[in-house]
Image: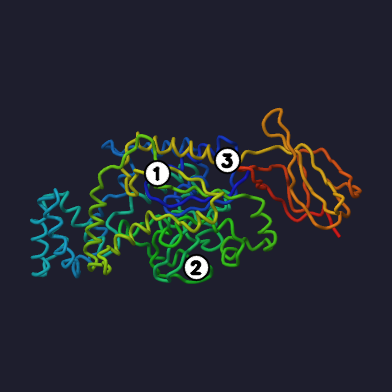
Amino acid sequence: MKYDLVFEGGGAKGAAFVGAFREFEKRNHTFRKLVGTSAGAITATLMAAGYTPSEMWDALSEKSTDGESIFSMFLAPPTIDEIPTAVLGNSVTVKVLKAFEKWLNNSSYHQSLEILEKILKGFESGSNLKAILESATHGETRDWILMIISAVELGGACSVQHFISWLENKLEAKNQCFGGVSLKGFYEMTKVDLSLCATDVTGQELLVLNHRTAPRLPVTMAVRMSMNIPFVWPPVTWEKMFGFYRERNLYKHKIVDGGVLSNFAVRLTTSAGPEIISVMKDSDISESEYTRLMNDCPTIGFMLDDNEVIPGVQPVASSGLMLFIKGIEEMIGGLQDSDGISLAGNLWKTIMEGNDNFVVSAEKDIVCHLPVKGIDTLEFNMTTDRQKAMVDEAQEATKKYFEQYPEYIVNDLYLAVGEDGKFEIGCKINGDPGKEDWFGLYESPSVGGDAYLNGNKKEAKKGKNVFCTTTDAKIGEYEVRYYAINGGSFKLVKKAGPLTQVSTP
């Protein structure tokens, strides 16, 4: 069966999507549209490029030369050359470094104060900060100082170059033509409708990046924008070469993680509102056709659920980077309300780990909850054992999700007209072997009129049933090839376009 798939953002927790994809493929399902935010954007893009679940697991298992997870490089400190000379020579970072003095003194980086003293004196005397940092004898301390400067001056503590190189290599490994390809070119080559969510902090709006809205934007930059966690990586500056977004010039706009405004964008595949159609509909189809295609293809939203336990997995101690982020929060102007609650801390948690409760409650039938409790958003140095436990549990959760909505084959289709003038359209389904039941699909208060079953006109009179044996039947707007049952209620999971097999007065 074909689905539209939506992947939530969640940093390192996104490895769970490999398990979900493994079960999805095992059941021989296919996808039409892929939507992703942050970590979900990475997954959706690799799936669109043709990666299989086993290939994605191999990517998760890669190690660097020092035996660490390859993803730990995503949190590497920037090099001195990545920080513009103007920033190093004329900066307000000195104020931040002073604010961090106590934090550095309490950390294990006992050499930090020595370097910090040199930096402060360098600012006061007008010395070249780059030269001071290059002369520092303690590389680990120098890295942390560079991360502080990068976080405050550029908006992100870590270098993003390792991630960009990794993604480019993965795409080119599938197809050399994917190197540097635009969203439009990627769509033309893969025929997969891919949409990635990002946040324009300059224009203060959600960006839905796809071949319709930003055709010239490179795929790697679209993913980079979507996964750009605030404070961790510097915002992306929209360049002229990226072209327009929905025919608007975003030149020099700052773009960050899509999770700031839409971490779980299931509305993009379940709503036919004008704001959704404007970014998700191709120009060569009508709005009615778009709605028909949307109804024809159910959505599954894969949610990274912090409340669902992974057996045997316990939280690990906060990484040095997470402690560093907390230092930034403390530094941001004492942002606390009258009750002493940290506004910066709550903002960070809401952006990166808060669940979209409104979406989950409104669309609960289409949400598949993947357990990630105990996994840190920034745990990119996760051990293979923890990764495997999370991936395996995600596959099991996806299996249970599908088992809630079993598929039944339609054996017989009928039209029944009662003595009261009402008629019912229904089907006979075969679920478990040897078990057959009848279920109604539609009931009307109108008097029965002409009935067209599989194109053949049948006479419908009071008290008379008309049967048509088929395994691929269409009635009205419904294609009843698949019919699902959940807890005693019925859910049509496959729809077709407006047909005329059944008509009423």
SS assignment at label 1: strand
**Which residue sits at x=38%, y=66%?**
254
In front of the other: label 1 or label 3? 3
User: Residue 48, percent across and down?
Assistant: 53, 47
Q: CA distance from mark 1 to mark 3?
A: 21 Å
User: Residue 359, percent across and down?
Assistant: 50, 57
Q: Classify mark 1: residues with Cα within 10 Å, few (<14), some (14-19) or many (20+).
A: many
User: Residue 365, percent across and down?
Assistant: 56, 49
**Which residue sits at x=53%, y=37%?**
399
- Who comes first in sequence, dot 1 or dot 2? 2
Amino acid type of disc 3? Answer: Gln
Q: Nearer the viewer, residue 123 or 308?
A: 308
Please indicate whether residue 15 sits to the left or right of residue 503 in the image: left
User: Residue 490, percent across and down?
Assistant: 66, 46
Q: Which residue is mark 2?
A: 244
Please indicate whether residue 448 sits to the left or right of residue 63 in the image: right
- Who comes first in sequence, dot 3 or dot 2? 2
Amino acid type of disc 2? Answer: Phe
Marks 1 & 3, CB-CB < 8 Å contact:
no
Q: How many discs mark residues in the rendered view?
A: 3
Q: Classify mark 2: residues with Cα within 10 Å, few (<14), some (14-19) or many (20+).
A: some
Marks 3 & 2, CB-CB < 8 Å contact:
no
Q: Which residue is mark 3?
A: 404
**Which residue sits at x=73%, y=42%?**
439
In front of the other: label 1 or label 2? 1
Q: Which residue is mark 1?
A: 372
* Residue 150, picture quadrant: bottom left
Q: Nearer the viewer, residue 432 or 148?
A: 432
